[in-house]
Image: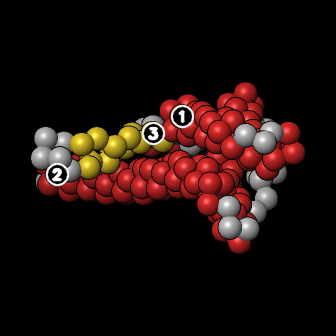
Amino acid sequence: MDLNPPAGENYAHPNICFFHVLFKAAALAFYILSALFFDSFVIIFVVTVLLAALDFWVVKNVSGRILVGLRWWNEINDEGESVWKFECLDQESLARINKKDSWLFWWTLYLTAVLWLFLGIFSLIRFQANYLLVVGVCLTLSIANIVGFTKCRKDAKKQLQAFATQTLASRFSSTIQSAFTVV
């Protein structure tokens, strides 16, 4: 992944990008700054986890679909097994995804998890098990989105390869058939 956003291109969906970043920043900022304003662990836990849950929902159901054209969910089948389900835009639409939107989506997705991990290590060093619980919940939500969207992206690439292979085989077959029908 490139460290710098693509140059010369504006965000195609600035409002979605704003909300994609808003809940991540709000959860992190509230968690970090809350110790200055609140003595109640319960308030810190509830508000931070609520903001992280809002972020999880926005990323999974809104910004993932619009910014990168991917959506995932997990179902339990009749045998009790976990089954991952993926959706992606058609290949033509995926090719038109805004590079800057995509860059923002992936970088903030990974960066948020790294920051929660750092805060977890900090809580561990300070022997604050209760705050480690808050960070653990937030990190779990972040990692769930990372795993879901990474699997979804891999599935989309497989679909693209299958589509390209099928298209080439179909064209090759029709070319061969037309060559023999002329004879």
Q: Which amino acid does label 2 sit on?
A: Gln
| First-in-chain label (2 vs 1) | 1
Q: Which amino acid does label 1 sit on?
A: Trp
Disc 1 marks which residue?
A: 57
Across and down, in percent, residue 88 comes to: 43, 40
Q: Which residue is outermost to the top?
A: 15
Q: State whether residue 26 is above or below residue 147.
A: above
| First-in-chain label (3 vs 1) | 1
Distance (Cα) linking label 2 and label 3: 39 Å
Regarding mark 3 in the picture, which secondary structure is present there?
A: strand
Give me the residue at 47% from left, 56% from top. Answer: 147
Distance (Cα) linking label 2 and label 1: 51 Å
Residue 177 got which mark? 2
Regarding mark 1 in the picture, which secondary structure is present there?
A: helix
Q: What residue type is labelled 3?
A: Arg
Circle 1 Cα neighbour tier, 10 Å, few/some/many (<14 / 14–19 / ≥20): some
Left-right relation of 71 to 169: right
Q: State whether residue 61 is above or below residue 151.
A: above
| First-in-chain label (2 vs 3) | 3
Give me the residue at 62% from left, 60% from top. Answer: 129
**Front residue of 173 and 39:** 39
Residue 110, can we see it? Answer: no
Give me the residue at 74% from left, 46% from top. Answer: 31
Across and down, in percent, residue 118 comes to: 70, 65
Across and down, in percent, residue 101 comes to: 68, 42
**Front residue of 158 and 137:** 137
Regarding mark 2 in the picture, which secondary structure is present there?
A: helix
Give me the residue at 32% from left, 48% from top. Answer: 84
Disc 3 marks which residue?
A: 71
Circle 3 Cα neighbour tier, 10 Å, few/some/many (<14 / 14–19 / ≥20): many
